Image (spheres, rainbow, N blue to C red):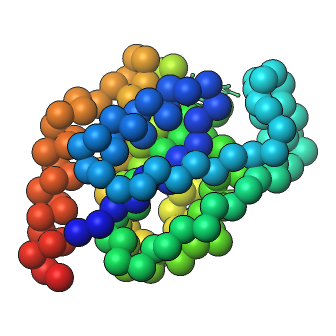
Amino acid sequence: MKSIIIYYSNSGTTKKLAERIQNVFGGDLVVVEPYGVYFHALKRVSEERKNQIIAAYTMPSVDLNEIDVVFVGFPLWYSEAPEFLMDCLKRYDFMGKKIIPFSTSGASHIKNSLKSLQSSVGDSEIICPLNQGLILKDNFDKWVDNVKGIMSVIATNK
Ligand SMILES: Cc1cc2nc3c(=O)[nH]c(=O)nc-3n(C[C@H](O)[C@H](O)[C@H](O)COP(=O)(O)O)c2cc1C
């Protein structure tokens, strides 16, 4: 049973969560970086959304052979995942893999972002989304137990 963690973090919160997940489940951490900084992020993101611009980004080369579970992490930006990250995901072949999304936020919930995530990962099944917002925070330990249970089923069925 192998997993990998693909994520983006602008100000470090999602990075910390990605590392916490790595501590539990192992797997490589893969960062997708946009070109340029999101320093005035509120302004840049709203301008990009308004003009339907997808920021250019570097696409990491990732060996997905033997990977069963792909964790995908992002901050919620106006309730959605960053477009460039969703665009990047479309370029990988996740067929047959389980996708486990995790997000950080102020008050928004990850469920708002799952539709665009689904359209980026094709027919792959999205399971066990984890929201770690300042206000809406899922129980991390319970989530870990759920994910471990699913991973052991995947391992048994291999
Ligand atoms: C452009 C922008 C838009 C945001 N929109 C939301 C939002 O709609 N809802 C929310 O709860 N938090 C929102 N936030 C807060 C971030 O989701 C939150 O600070 C997140 O943890 C940042 O993660 P990071 O440090 O990994 O970049 C927004 C932040 C930025 C920069």
Q: Total marks drawn? A: 0
> Foreground: 139 or 19?
19
Query: Is residue 85 visible from the viewing direction of this image?
Result: yes
Quarter of the image for residue 60 reads bottom right
Q: Give the image location of residue 124, x and y in percent.
A: 42, 72
Residue 85 placement, left or right of 4: right
Residue 135 placement, left or right of 32: left
Residue at image location 75% in from the left, 46% down from the top: 34
Q: Give the image location of residue 8, x and y in percent.
A: 59, 43
Residue at image location 53% in from the left, 77% down from the top: 93
Query: Is residue 131 visible from the viewing direction of this image?
Result: no
Quarter of the image for residue 21 reads top left
Q: Give the image location of residue 75, x and y in percent.
A: 56, 34
- The quadrant of the rendered image in which ligand 1 is seen is top right
Q: Quadrant of the C terminus?
A: bottom left
Residue at image location 54% in from the left, 41% down from the top: 74
Residue 124 placement, left or right of 119: left
Q: Give the image location of residue 91, x and y in percent.
A: 64, 72
Q: Up-down: is 36 above or below 156? A: above
Residue at image location 16% in from the left, 49% down from the top: 146
Q: Quadrant of the N terminus?
A: bottom left
